Amino acid sequence: MPAAARAVRAFVAAHGREPTLLVRSPARVNLIGEHTDYNDGLCLPVAIDRELCIALRRTDDVAAGADPAAGAHLRLVSEQDPTPAVIELPPPPADTPPSARATGWTRYVQGVAVQLAASGQLAASGQPAGADLVPWQGALASDIPLGAGLSSSAALELAVAVACTHLAGSVPAPTELARLAQRAENAWVGAATGLLDQLACVGGIAGHALRIDCRTLTVTPVPLPAGLAVVVIDTGSRRELVTSAYADRRAECERAARALGVPALRDLDALSADAASRLDPVALRRARFVIAENARVDAVAEALTRGDAEAAGRLLLAGHRGIRDDFEVSGPELDAAVAAAYAAPGCFGARMTGGGFAGCAVALVDRARLEAFTETFEPAYFARTGREAVLHVCSAVAGTSVTVLPDE
Ligand code: GLA
């Protein structure tokens, strides 16, 4: 059963009545442009048809049969956790110490509520800032694998943000929503991530990848050729301690930019011998990767636009080598998946995708040869790793949206 139908069913089971709204928020896969977002660089994600859905209903609407017992809070049940997320309203102040914040997935919901309350984004157009969060109850269902690098957390953040702003009658710009969700993740959850995930999730366009300039926040749609399948390969591997390795990479890139006298690595097109001599070996590898990766984003966008899947595939393979050898965030299962994918029929190229170390790879595959690709890939990956991979043949879909459900 699709996530949307499961969310509606879970809502009825938990709250004993029908929901009035359905929010859908997609996962994203990044085709190229990895670890470039926090360097003010370029990336090329696709919002994909694996989605997180929240069915919901406001609880303060007396005319529509308010549930006084629901109280002043957001209450969200999930099919993945027996303990609901309950956020008291008004939410806690933004400087609440980390030890007094919610834990687990509830922290993302709470972080969005905190940032919304602090932001003035709840004001309906023409009204003064500072409107209150509307209490609601909801049920969440998701087809986005957790911890796989497909942005299940950004999908949740954006779904909650869109639910709350819709109920408040405000329609913030997608980039504002993305930034707000990023603040929830950076300042409340404590993960110093860039803006790739949130912009991809909120900005998705059916049939297109999104070329994102993370400095100007300009999003340019790039058409995906009809005969090309975007295949996400969940390698089945997951890693702990990814957050600290991510923070290390970010600090190394900032160190390189400082040593090179530029605001961000984005500001460089090449490294001269003189510039390279000012960097320690680690910073040199990181800078070399980011500079080449930014160039690959434009090259892949151009290749896809002219329908040249072979060129796009070669660039993905080059991206994988760079992120493995220079940026050093690949992992054994990701390397095995890329090698097995590229050796299979119909594959133009593949690379790891997302933050790294474990999770998913992405392959560009000739749609006409998908069956042969799958039949060859699955046993080859198993032979290399002893693990079963899960393949998702993805379509590019629209970003986070809200639908008013028909009255029962
Ligand atoms: C994670 C982060 C993103 C981005 C990618 C790497 O997904 O959340 O901001 O940095 O890693 O490209």
Image (cartoon, rainbow, N blue to C red):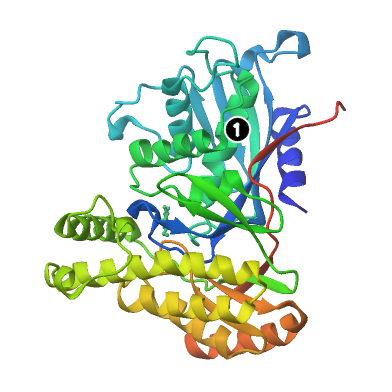
Task: Tell me the quarter of the picture where residue 326 sits.
Answer: bottom left
Residue 199 x %, y %: 52, 46
Front residue of 194/302: it is: 302
Task: Tell me the quarter of the picture where residue 24 sits.
Answer: top right
Task: Tell me the quarter of the picture where residue 190 sits.
Answer: top left
Query: Could you tell me which quadrant the C terminus lies in?
Result: top right
Q: Is mark 1 on a helix, strand or loop?
A: helix
Residue 362 x %, y %: 56, 71
State left or right for residue 7 relative to residue 247.
right
State left or right for residue 208 relative to residue 262.
right
Name the residue at 63% across, 15% down: 69
Ligand 1 is within 8 Å of the C-beta of the residue at disc 1: no
Q: Which residue lies furthest to the right in this view?
A: 408
**Amino acid type, callout 1:** Val
Q: Mark 1 points at which residue?
A: 162
Name the residue at 60% across, 22% down: 170
Name the residue at 50% across, 65% down: 298
Displayed-image quarter of ligand 1: bottom left
- Is 38 rendered above or below residue 386? above
